[in-house]
Image (cartoon, rainbow, N blue to C red):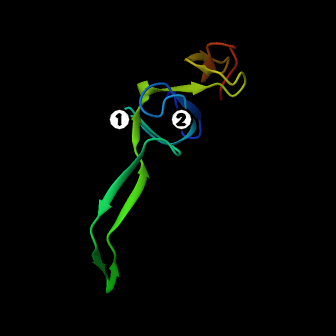
């Protein structure tokens, strides 16, 4: 089970956007990276190109770049503080994520 999932609110704890809280847009567990809304904005220069008879002009595209998982911490929805994530097994045998500070379920 993943500690950080799509739709979670996280806080950046390292890098140029330190202290920023944002929502997780994508999670790439294989690369241990997450993409956050409005954080780590990168610019990419694209050449002009022909697309099926239409000319697409050259442009500078801004997009959100991925951030390593170790540079973000989950914000607990109950106590609104950044926290480490623990796990607890229910009576049914299902694993749930738990806030380490207030001991409440995150899911």
Res. 93 in view: no
Can you tell which mark lies on residue 30?
1
Locate residue 16: give its quadrant: top left
**Towards the viewer: 18 or 22:** 18
Q: Secondary structure at mark 1?
A: loop
Horizontal side of 38 relative to 96 (left or right) equals: left
Crowd tier of the residue under label 1, counting other residues whose Cα lies within 10 Å: few below 14, some 14–19, many 20 or above: few
Instruction: State whether residue 24 is above or below residue 84.
Output: below
How far apart are the two marked residues, 2 and 1, measured between alpha carbons? 13 Å
Quadrant into which the C terminus falls: top right
Instruction: State whether residue 63 is above or below residue 103.
Output: below
Rendered location of residue 85, percent (x, y):
56, 19
Res. 55 in view: yes
Look at 42% across and 24% down and name the residue there: 70
Horizontal side of 5 relative to 28 (left or right) equals: right
**Residue identified by numbered label 2:** 5
Locate residue 56: give its quadrant: bottom left
Q: Earlier in the sequence, mark 2 or mark 1?
A: 2
Rendered location of residue 44, percent (x, y):
33, 56
Can you tell which mark lies on residue 20?
none
**Towards the viewer: 65 or 19:** 19
């Amino acid at each position: 089970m993943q500690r950080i999932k799509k739709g979670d609110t996280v806080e950046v704890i390292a890098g140029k956007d330190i202290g920023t809280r944002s929502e997780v847009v994508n999670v790439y567990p294989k690369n241990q990276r997450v993409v956050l809304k409005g954080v780590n904005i990168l610019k990419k220069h694209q050449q002009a190109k022909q697309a099926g008879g239409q000319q697409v002009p050259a442009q500078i595209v801004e997009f959100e770049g991925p951030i390593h998982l170790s540079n973000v911490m989950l914000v607990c929805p109950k106590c609104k503080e950044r926290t480490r994530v623990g796990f607890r097994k229910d009576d049914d045998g299902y694993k749930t994520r738990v806030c380490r500070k207030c001991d409440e379920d995150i899911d």
